[in-house]
Amino acid sequence: MPWICTPPVGKRLQIMPNLKSLVLQDCHAVTTFSDFPTFPNLEELKIRDTVFQKFEIVEEMKSLKRLDLSRTSIRELPSSAIRYLTNLEQLTLKACEKLKHVACNIFELQHLQLLDIWHCYKLVTFPTKSEFSTESAPLQDTHYAPLFVNLEFCDNLVEIADIPREIYRLDTFLCPRLKRILKLTDSLEGKDSRMIPRMSLLGRNQLASEVVKMKKSLLDNSDSTALFFLFFSCRQLKYQVIFDMTDIPEWFTCRMDVNNRGHQVCNFKIDFPGNFQWEDKGLVVPYAIRCYNKAAE
């Protein structure tokens, strides 16, 4: 139901038990929305490209699975609202330019699979330390869906704080002020042997500089070296990391050959420093190399 622009929405609607999807887009008169009792079986709600400022829920929305508040004027996603989204699977907050706070209890939503907070440039710390529930069962005692967190283009993001739940993928592409990812720091210091299975650290940020201060016995002080050797400190069996290798360091060499079957193969070599500490280090294939030949296209 797109293009509904008469506020408040609930005044002109009766209870609609069969409505599954509701879209409010470019409805600049809608600044708040709390009419959920009108749509008891709603599975998808999109409120986008509006001056929408406040998201209120006064009772549990058991049917809601997908919530999209992209390009709105929302400043926070409060814990009081999050706790009613018990079956939410996808939360999208793209380009919410005023968003500053996402309450930590977002990770209590055990069915949540996607948390997309792309281009929210006022977000400094994620998640926000607030009223994280202590009354619910411990997170490790409940089965939680695999979670993908996207924080790309969050220009002022400085810290990714403690996340009380395992996530399988984290993207921080072009977060130039990012200095700290607590899970990485704990792994480097030996406090936590678990690693996020898939991470994208592409784009310049300040994370590598902080790693250089902590990590010793490096071949050089380049960002790529610091990040690369960070992941050799992890004891996890398998993980994938993507980070910027625009400036290829001298200790890394790569050669493209053709094998006896006529297939192109890539051989790479890594020179470790003589004083490199091998304790608790695993065998790691750092990344795949994909080459594009524009002349052949």
Image (cartoon, helix red, strand yellow):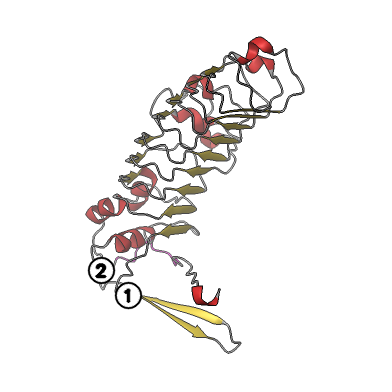
Residues 100 and 127: in front is: 100
Residue at far right of view: 18
Residue 56 visible in this rendered orientation of the protein: no
Task: Tell me if 262 is positioned left or right of 234 in this view.
Answer: right
**Callout 2: 10 Å neighbours few (<14), some, many (20+)?**
some
Dividing the picture into quadrants, the one containing residue 20 is top right
In the rendered image, residue 282 lying in the magenta stretch gets the answer yes
Cα separation, mark 1 vs mark 2, equals: 9 Å
Q: Quadrant of the C terminus?
A: bottom right
Can residue 4 be seen by looking at this rendering?
A: yes
Residue 210 horizontal/vertical position (percent):
26, 50
Q: Report the magenta residues as a range.
A: 277-284
Residue at 50 percent of width and 30 percent of height: 106
Secondary structure state at the residue bearing disc 2: loop
Residue type of the residue flagged with mark 2? Leu
For disc 2, the marked residue is 219
Q: Name the residue: 48% across, 44% down.
A: 150
Query: Is label 1 in a helix, a strand or a loop?
Result: loop
Q: Residue at x 31, y 73 (%)?
A: 251
The vertical placement of 122 against 207, above or below, is: above
Dot 1 amino acid type: Asp
The residue that disc 1 covers is 271
**Outermost residue toward the bottom in this view:** 260
| Number of marks in picture | 2
Q: Quadrant of residue 12?
A: top right
Q: Is residue 171 above or below residue 5?
A: below
Q: Is residue 256 magenta?
A: no
Which mark, residue 80?
none
Residue 229 is situated, as x and y percent measured from the top left of the image, at: 34, 62
Contact, CB < 8 Å: mark 1 with mark 2? yes
* Rendered residue at 66%/15% (across/down): 37
Pointer 1 local density, CA inside 10 Å: few below 14, some 14–19, many at least 20: few
